[in-house]
Image (spheres, rainbow, N blue to C red):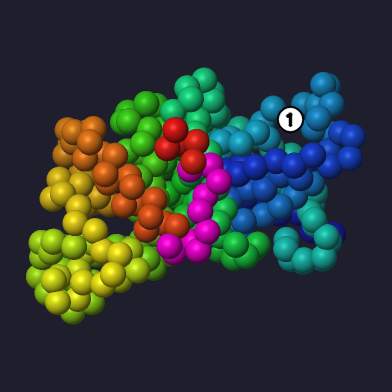
Amino acid sequence: MSLFRDDGIVLRTQKLGEADRIITFLTRRYGRVRAVARGVRRTKSKFGARLEPFSHVDVQYFARGSELIGRGLPLCTQTETIAAYGSGIVTDYDRYTAGTAMLETAERFTDHEGQPAVQQYLLLVGGLRTLARGEHAPRLVLDAFLLRSLAVNGYAPSLGDCARCGMPGPNRFFSVAAGGSVCGECRVPGSVVPSAEAVGLLSALLSGDWVSADACEGRHVREGSSLVSAYLHWHLERGLRSLRYVDK
């Protein structure tokens, strides 16, 4: 039997039995971890409220053997709140749906339990913090998170030079299958012709240029979001269930 300690974000919870829950975390050191929290659904539970989605917590696990990920699920024996991002997210529909899509994206990009995912973890912490503070429009925060998640996982879209031949941009066409912007010679079926403002918005979100992103018109924000959604769905091979509520 061994004790492990790490800090992480609660991605989701599942009921187990009459009073327990299975908690899915994205942690700094151990990546995605699923653990059992005993008795947290009881009204007298001391730490049940800390184990809700969007919570940033310091968590202690009790596991069999010398590895956290192994036979059976570890037990979550103690938690302390680092930041309760949920309080600034769940009371606003736009923030809540955007935040839910961020949690689902982070879980999908960390499919294998125990696989280190430090960059994805740091992106999620920063994204939830920004979302909870209301510093920028929720859809912009979500699109920035999705683009950067794609980038750290090796799927960064080309937004200038041609994704196929490298021809210097700007290039007129955009293809999710080809990897982003493409020139006329490399254009493939299904390519679209986005506005320069929408492509510029994606570049601003990817680089962290929030002054330019916040100043973008609504129609270009919607166009850019459509490109991000299509590109994400292509690389995840199936869509995010939560993203349909963001679109509404």
In this view, the residue in front, 168 or 118, is 168
Q: Position of residue 120 (x, y in %)?
A: 47, 55
Q: Is 129 positioned to the left or the right of 59 in the image?
A: left
Decide whether residue 126 is among the magenta residues.
no
Q: Quadrant of the N terminus?
A: bottom right
Residue farthest right in this picture? 18
Q: Is 201 positioned to the left or the right of 79 in the image?
A: left
Q: Position of residue 82 (x, y in %)?
A: 56, 34
Element assignment for label 1? loop
Q: Is 105 positioned to the left or the right of 73 in the image?
A: left
Residues shaded magenta: 234-243
Main secondary structure type of the part rendered in magenta: loop
Query: Picture quarter containing residue 214?
Result: top left
In this view, the residue in front, 239 or 79, is 239
Residue type highlighted by circle 1: Phe
In this view, the residue in front, 52 or 57, is 52
Q: Residues within 10 Å of mark 1 (few under 14, many from 20)?
A: some
Q: Position of residue 142 (x, y in %)?
A: 39, 41
Q: Is residue 204 visible?
A: no
Q: Residue at x 26, y 44 (%)?
A: 223
Residue farthest bottom in this picture? 165
Image height of 129 relative to 122, above or below? above
Which residue has dot 1 on it?
Answer: 47
Q: Residue at x 32, y 45 (%)?
A: 225
Image height of 231 relative to 186, above or below? above
Q: Residue at x 24, y 50 (%)?
A: 202
Q: Quadrant of the C terminus?
A: top left
